[in-house]
Amino acid sequence: MISNRNILITGGAGFIGSNLCEKLIELGNKVVCLDNFSTGNMKNIEFLLPNPNFKLITGDIRNPDDCREAVHGMDFVLHEAALGSVPRSIKDPATTNEVNISGFLNMLIAARDAKVKRFVYAASSSTYGDSAGLPKVEDVIGQPLSPYAVTKYVDELYANVFSKLFSIECIGLRYFNVFGRKQDPNGAYAAVIPHFVKLLISHQSPVINGDGEYSRDFTYIENVIQMNLLALTVNNPDSINTVYNTAYGERTTLNQLAGYLREFLSEYDPVIKNIQFLFGPARKGDIPHSLASVEKAQKLLGYHPEYNLRDGLKEAVQWYWENLK
């Protein structure tokens, strides 16, 4: 565990970032949150604002001055700020590039100049692109299938170059379909699980893109928190300046996911058990199947994911039921 350190979390008001803020404050660290609230939500962090160990900077990673202010005096950076969503990147590749590449580079430069010890960043399973092999292993990737995937791959290239040229320790965590409490169910680019949950609670039929047989390695937020803590604390030189799959290591189809959501939500509202899912066209840029090997993280970080999909969904569904009703 890590304590008594100064840690910057970019995108700290977002889904993953706010969970990391909460955990690191709980462990006795001083946390600075940098967020421009384009996708983050003040509700995610407002309970932390009175805490003397928490500081909010409203700023943008596209502004180098904001980045320099945020990294001042920091021991570590957890870089979660990004514009997610494959469809969003297809609709507006320029803004996705500005945030995910230019903003990422601004943060790397600021961290280097402030002599930050370690820079842990949110990478993405989208980097595997059209690579057909399963499970996905870190050193075998394909061609990107979306502008978003391009940006996350470029981030890995920049982090690798900076680690070699400037001796800043960089660790990338390739997130696989993270879900859990505080994930926004609203908006055109909402992730599939909170979006489906919101519709089912409202007795509406969710639409599955494609035939429902696309599969994902859905990863509960607690597993992601564990990976970030391990990435901050590992001291083995072989474990640093590399990337890791951040996942559970099991594959679930969208049809299976739909069944689980109906099952768990019907415990709160029996009507949901009989709601039918609809099917629409497959989305452009989507990877058909995604499954992670977590062997590298197990070997080099000591990673042991505690929550499988069903266990994570039960907790997430309870949170959404209590917060969306």
Image (cartoon, rainbow, N blue to C red):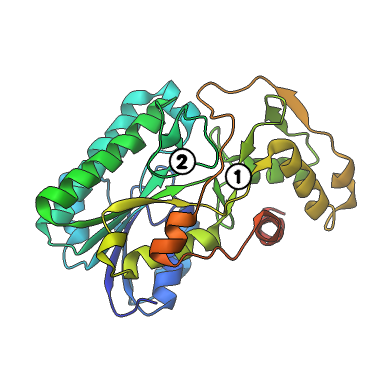
Against 121, residue 63 (above or below) is: above
Q: Name the residue at 41% across, 29% down.
A: 142
Q: CA distance from mark 2 to mark 1?
A: 21 Å
Q: Name the residue at 75% across, 42% down.
A: 256
Q: Name the residue at 33% across, 77% down.
A: 52
Disc 2 versus disc 1: nearer the observer: 2
Any part of residue 113 in sight: yes
- Residue 185: which numbered mark, if any? 1
User: N-terminal of the two: label 2 or label 1?
Assistant: 2
Between 195 and 303, the residue placed more toward the observer is: 303
Any part of residue 55 in sight: no
Between 204 and 308, the residue placed more toward the observer is: 308
Left-right relation of 13 to 157: right
SS of the residue under disc 2: helix
Between 237 and 51, the residue placed more toward the observer is: 237
Neighbor class of circle 2 (other Cα within 10 Å; few <14, some 14-19, many 20+) is: many
- Residue 125: which numbered mark, if any? 2
Amino acid type at circle 2 is Ser
Q: Quadrant of residue 233?
A: bottom left
Residue 172 screen position, x and y as percent? 34, 51
Neighbor class of circle 1 (other Cα within 10 Å; few <14, some 14-19, many 20+) is: some
Amino acid type at circle 1 is Pro
Residue 174 screen position, x and y as percent? 42, 47
Which of the image's four quarters has the C terminus?
A: bottom right
Which of the image's four quarters has the N terminus?
A: bottom left
Callout 2–callout 1 Cβ contact below 8 Å: no
SS of the residue under disc 1: loop
Residue 196 screen position, x and y as percent? 69, 41
